[in-house]
Amino acid sequence: MEHPQETYEAGVYRADNVRLLDLAGNKALPVGVDVFRTVVKNYIFVDKSMLIADVLEAPGATTLYCRPRRFGKSLNLSMLQAFFEAPVEGDPFLADTTELFSGLSIWDAEEGRYRAHHGAYPVIRFSFNDVKDLKWQTARETIRVKMAFECSRHGYLAESPQLTDGDKVAFKAIAGQKASEGELKRSLSTLASLLYKHHEAPVVVLIDEYDAPVMAGYTNGYYNDVVDFLKGWLTGMLKSNEVLAFAVLTGVQRISKESIFSDLNNLTVNTSLSLASDERYGFTQAEIEAIAAYRGQEDGVEDARAWYDGYRFGSVDVYNPWSALNYFKNDCAPDLYWANTSGNGVLGDMVRTSSDRTMADLYHLMEPGGFVEKTLDLSVVFPDVGIRPDTLWSMLYLAGYVTTEDVELPNSTLKTRRLHIPNEEIRELFRAEVIQRFSQDAGGRDRLIDLHATLQDGDAAIVEEKLSSILLNNASYHDLTREAPYHTLLLGLLFGMRGYADPVSNREAGRGRFDVRVEPVRPNRAPLLTIEAKWAAPESPESTDLPSLAQQALSQIDERAYESGAAHGDAGTMRWGIAFSGKNVACACERA
């Protein structure tokens, strides 16, 4: 790693064009801390302050930023709040923040012209991060409580001489959690109007994780209720409202404009495909190197790149910031940091319920250098999930499980894009989901391990018995009408073999293309496994003699030299011919 030009002065570490703010000087990392004031005063803050300029220069009054979870959305929104919010005397929530920004890029940018916006606006900050209830009634009450809390931040309004008695009654109803259904639906615009009157300045609205209640509503059966509420709650505030300076929303999924924002014509949507603000979420290579140099962990950069880099946002390659911070905090030990922060429902549903074709795409994706070519429609309508096949890949992309360098025409739903897994952490997550699904099919993880052992040992009778049991207990007879379902099953069952790489399929070798091959990590300790599968239609002549068909498959491996180019040593190779028809199976094997 080349050493950049480094300086450290007054709590600001500079390495070329990167700035790290560390006012405490203790080089601590803010893992799990997303309050800007707290981070800047106690931890290393990677300077993303030029997002403030992006927001001010955005073409619409409302900007929606969609990025994967744990990519800095909440911290950035807290930074926006700290910069824009007008201080209020005696209120610690609304204290002056000049000292927090004076060392950041935004303070110097364009000869300091953005300072005119510092502390210039009343701000409403609302987060839906914990509005994920099982029932709409409970979710609605959670929103009511959170609106009351936001009013309490602006408690001075209750005594404001600029407000009428009627204004104060409306404010106290929201603050006291006594607002009617209609008043709650108008509560955002009501609070903004009161702030405008008191401050005599337009209001900035910041909404975090706006899509969380929509996703919960889809999962738990109150999608229509929550969309109807949000459409009124948000649109009443954001549509051509003279009291609004500008608004910023964040989320993972881009809920379709038709669902919530149909009445807005001033909305700018910024996704991972967008060129604008592409450096503001996630860490660039230069920022990772600056963190490593500042903390004396330069030797960890190479592993960090393999495990947590690989995302493309607009024209910039970025690291997962949550995982990178955890990695450096844990002495540069690679682990599944991001993958274990919350459920991986979209990916899990894909692996558990997808068609053979989608599973084949997933297997190609997991191979070294693997990719799939798909169109993306990032305006997700949740009732379409599971109906439109393209919706799944779009949701996986927005959620951060796949990425692409094909970012041209970001709003096109017709452009084919090459999607791939970004890094080793996400590859491990895919692998874990596949192993979990096929462990269940095998009757548990222990039984799957037993199957792996018998495949290595060459015990055809036991493998045949185990595969027969899996087909009888897990496969639908109506699905077993072609070879593809069996191929999907075999591949899935071979993930997670101890001492082996992931299985690969349909690769050219020798004089043809083998069906499945699993290469040992240490060829002298475990045999190379090559599997050729055959399928016979039920009631066909071949279906009456599956052992002969399995033997034909076994012979084909040798005749076409499918083991060519594969790593094998003293442990030799194990060849398998497996024949299927309906829920019947026959196996033949030989060691070479």
Image (cartoon, helix red, strand yellow):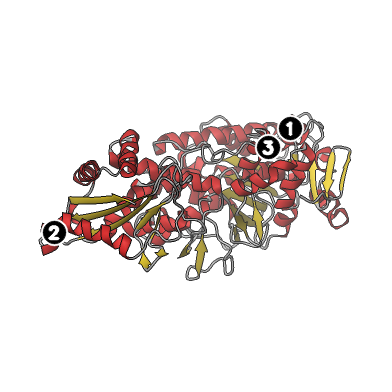
Q: At x 38% / y 54%, what residue is drawn? A: 517
Residue density around tag 2, few if under 14, some if 14–19, many if 20 or more, within 10 Å:
many
The residue tagged with tag 1: helix, strand or loop? loop
Instruction: Identify the disc placed on residue 5.
Output: none
**Horizontal arrangement in the rendering, residue 312 relative to residue 474 (left or right):** right
Nearest to the observer: residue 332 or residue 107:
332
The residue tagged with tag 3: helix, strand or loop? helix
In x, y percent, where is residue 217? 41, 44
Residue density around tag 1, few if under 14, some if 14–19, many if 20 or more, within 10 Å:
some
Which residue is tagged 2? Answer: 543
Is the residue under label 2 in contact with that under label 3 (CB below 8 Å)? no
Alpha carbon distance from label 2 to label 1: 66 Å
Label 3 vs label 2, nearer the camera: 2
Q: At x 71% / y 35%, what residue is drawn? A: 29
In x, y percent, where is residue 208? 59, 44
Q: Amino acid at mark 2?
A: Ser
Alpha carbon distance from label 3 to label 1: 10 Å
Nearest to the observer: residue 115 or residue 69:
69
N-terminal of the pair, mark 2 or mark 1, is 1
Nearest to the observer: residue 271 or residue 528:
528
Query: In the rendered image, is residue 197 in sight?
Result: no
Which residue is tagged 3? Answer: 328
Which residue is tagged 1? Answer: 28
Nearest to the observer: residue 541 or residue 440:
541
In x, y percent, where is residue 9? 89, 40
Label 2 vs label 1, nearer the camera: 2
Up-down relation of residue 271 to residue 449 (above or below): below
Q: Amino acid at mark 3?
A: Phe
N-terminal of the pair, mark 3 or mark 1, is 1
